[in-house]
Amino acid sequence: MHNIKKYIKGLGLCLTLLLTGHVSSAQSETLNLSNEETSMIVISLVLVVMVLVLLVAFYLLTILRVMVREDGIRRAKEKGIEYVEEPSMWSKFYAGLTDAVPIEEEATVELDHNYDGIRELDNHLPPWWTYMFYASIVFAVIYMFMYHVSGSLPLQTEEYEIAMAEAQANRAVADEGSSIDESNIVFSNDPAVLASGKTVYERNCVACHKAGGEGGIGPNLTDEYWLHGGSIQDIYNTIKNGVPDKGMIAWGDVLSPTKMNDVSSYIETLKGTNPPNAKAPQGELYKEKAIEEAVAE
Ligand code: HEC
């Protein structure tokens, strides 16, 4: 008895740990499971335990029924009467489902036709069927009213038009930005744009231009000398069309206009940052217009 108690305690502890995720987080570290996998394991363990508990409960219930039955028989014997078994839950449920007259009383519902020995019973319709029939009538009335009388819900063609309009609107949002090109790009210091540009740069450009833009296979992007022009329009143009025979990819085929816009603005912010190990200047001197104007004044 003592042992069983201990065992049950241990089992309870295991379950609580599993449910609160203590074991699961330890597990996921050692086994490298994703959160989703761990929760799947926990859920399936809980399900298994539930099924086992249900099986045991069902088994106990069967034993209980047998005992009750035997007790009933014994008592009926003592009183000297015949034992009548209580109908089981299932048979009660089934009788309620069909609402049929029991076989012993069938004579009361028999119709007076007799087709070569085939007789007909006038049983009730099964209640589940009748209620479903009534429900379908109610549904039909509501449906008719909503779709055809009040028109408050869309019919097929309207649904189609609504879906098309939605798709159009989504496309308009997705297209926003695709109108950017080298003729109309402007520098943006919006942190979101620069962050996005930085990501684009780190994913695609670092290999040749290096982390700080100091240049490697590709030229230095931080100095004032540019092979293909240093204005943001020129930079966008170089990125979009590339310099294929010199090893600079035409990113227009790979990146969206928005992404090229963002990375162009990001490159603008690299100008003049003087990173270490900078590559020697290449190309022609380019000074920002604003600076040139300031110098001229
Ligand atoms: C495979 C290597 C490589 C990758 C990757 C690369 N570039 Fe280049 N890039 C070059 C080379 C080489 C040049 C110089 C072309 C020339 O000599 O005309 C260049 C030139 C440029 C220039 C013009 C520089 C100037 O002096 O006019 C810009 C701007 C530029 N790259 C931006 C980018 C951006 C932005 C990315 C990422 C989206 C990128 N590059 C990815 C190799 C690369």
Image (tube, grey):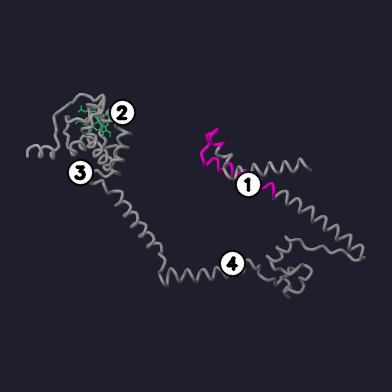
Camera-side residue of 296 and 92: 296
The reply, left or right, for residue 247 in relation to residue 21 is left
Q: Earlier in the sequence, mark 3 or mark 4?
A: 4
Q: Quadrant of ligand 1?
A: top left
Residue span colored magenta:
26-53
For mark 1, does the 10 Å Cα neighbourhood hold few (<14), some (14 to 19), or many (20 or more) residues? Answer: few
Query: What separation in Å lies between label 1 and label 3 (alpha carbons)?
Result: 59 Å
Question: Which residue is labeled 4 in the image?
Answer: 132
Disc 2 Cβ-to-ligand 1 distance below 8 Å: yes
Badge 2 crowding class, 10 Å Cα cut-off, few under 14, some 14 to 19, many 20 or more, is some
Which of the two labelled residues, at mark 1 and mark 3, occupies the earlier sequence position? 1
Q: Earlier in the sequence, mark 4 or mark 2?
A: 4
The structure residue drawn at horizontal position 67% and vertical position 48%, both measured from the top left corner, is 51
SS for dot 2: helix
Seen at 46% across and 70% down, the residue is 144
Q: Which mark is residue 186?
A: 3
What is the magenta segment's predominant secondary structure?
helix
Rounded to the nearest angstrom, the CA distance separating label 4 from label 1 is 33 Å
Coordinates of residue 225 in the picture (x, y in percent): 16, 29
- Does residue 270 show up magenta in the picture? no
Does the beta carbon of the residue at mark 1 sit less than 8 Å from ligand 1?
no
> Of 148 and 55, which appears nearest the observer?
55
The kind of residue tagged 3 is: Val
Residue at the spot of label 1? 47
**Mark 4 element type:** helix
From this view, report whether residue 141 is shown above or below residue 264.
below
Q: Which residue is mark 2?
A: 207
**Does the segment drawn in magenta span residue 52?**
yes
* Disc with the residue nearer the chain's start (1 vs 2): 1
Foreground residue, 233 or 165? 233
